[in-house]
Image (tube, helix red, strand yellow):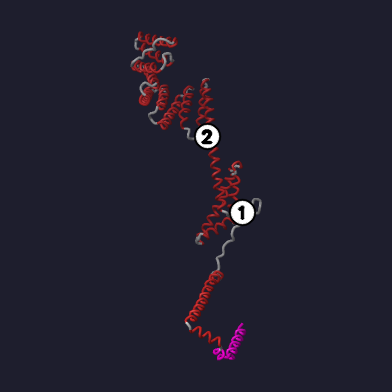
Amino acid sequence: MAEFFSRAVDWVRSLASGWDWTAVRDHPAWTALWKTAASPEGAALIATTFAVLGLGIVVGYLWARPRAVAAAPTEIPAAEPPAMALPPAPDTAPPPADAAPTALRSILRQRGLAPAAVDARIDAFRADLAAGRATLDELAAAADPADETDVMVAAATRALEWGDFEAAIDALDKAGARFGTAGRRMADAAEKRHLAAVRAATLAGDLEMAQFRFAAAAKLFARALALLPEGSDGLIATLLTRQATAIFQDGTVAEAETLLRRAVEVTERLRGAAHPEVAKALSRLAFVRYAAGQPAEAEALYRRALSIDETILGGDHQAVAGDLSNLAQLLLRGGNPAAAEPLLRRALAIRQAALAPGDVEVARSARAYADVLRRLKRPEDANRVLADAALARRQTAEGSGPSLPTLTP
């Protein structure tokens, strides 16, 4: 190459030394060109020509420069792990043993994490990977072909083994949604079956009670309580009362009392301290407390029940008549007919005002009131009450005559 340039220079020198520059200067073409250049028009033409040539040189340089810069590497690129191939179709070769950690390392490097941070996260990921695989195994065991969760879990497992985290996340998200829908559906079905089991056991217990087989009934009511699903607190007090009644009838007063106290607590929690259902629970507990030999506590419970019903339902409600009768019977058994008389009179008046004269509750109240009148040595009043009640029943049956006059407290 050096020899070639040397010969080229010698050739140019010999050509220049043999050139007749005088002939060139005196040539007519050169003379005409010089005259043209000396004129204003010629000078402008020459200047324009040189400007166009210069602009062409600049544009050519700028157009070629970016290509040259891009083509010339400025630094050696850092070594990166090869890109992960897409997970193969099922029944093909298994993924490399370290595919998932390798893929995660590539992702973390692309996010600009320091090498030490990448290594620490990869070590933690390797430790977590076993737990992740165990979770996928549990999901596979719970999957069901009916809702295609088995396909989604299998896809998530395969994607994770190949390090395709986006595909694994997508499959797990879809599987989770399907599992949630199926779980809610199964929970609803399970709750309905539990409630059906509760109703079946309760009805069987009621049939045992009808046959006076109280111990068997108590067991069935206990089974119904155990089968109650969560959120069925409204049925707890009812079943506790049934079970307590069966146990009480079987002769176990203490256990019945425990169940009824629990029924009162449950009802108060659900309904509030002043509610007619609480009054009913208190009356049942009062009955058992009297049977257990605690008349003073029983009376306090009856009076509390009466106060609740009078406040909530009003003084002329049938529940109030029942509370009055219960309290009066307790006082009679305690040897205090004078205190019981106004209570029974008021109970009869409430029932006369609300029920037909021939109603069984009116007849029962009339007999109870007549009985307390006899205890108070008022047989004429007792006979009058019974006679009026009998007349009212006959007139009601015949469809004529006035109803029984209402007794005033």
* Res. 94 in view: yes
**Front: mark 1 or 2:** 1
Mark 1 = which residue?
A: 87
Residue at image point 59% right, 59% down: 83
Residue 191, numbered label:
2
In front: 260, or 366? 366
In front: 175, or 234? 175
In front: 238, or 38? 38
Mark 1 residue element: loop
The stretch drawn in magenta includes residue 16: yes
Residue 260, numbered label:
none
Residue 293, image x, y percentages? 40, 22
Mark 2 residue element: helix
Disc tally is 2
Instruction: State which region is magenta.
Output: 1-26
Looking at the rendered structure, the kind of residue marked 2 is Glu
CA distance separating discs 1 and 2: 42 Å
> What is the quadrant of the N terminus in the image?
bottom right
The rendered magenta stretch, by its main secondary structure, is classed as helix
Q: Is residue 137 left or right of residue 287?
A: right
Looking at the rendered structure, the kind of residue marked 1 is Pro
Residue at image point 53% right, 85% down: 32
What crowding class fits label 1: few (fewer than 14 Cα within 10 Å), some (14-19), or many (20 or more)? some
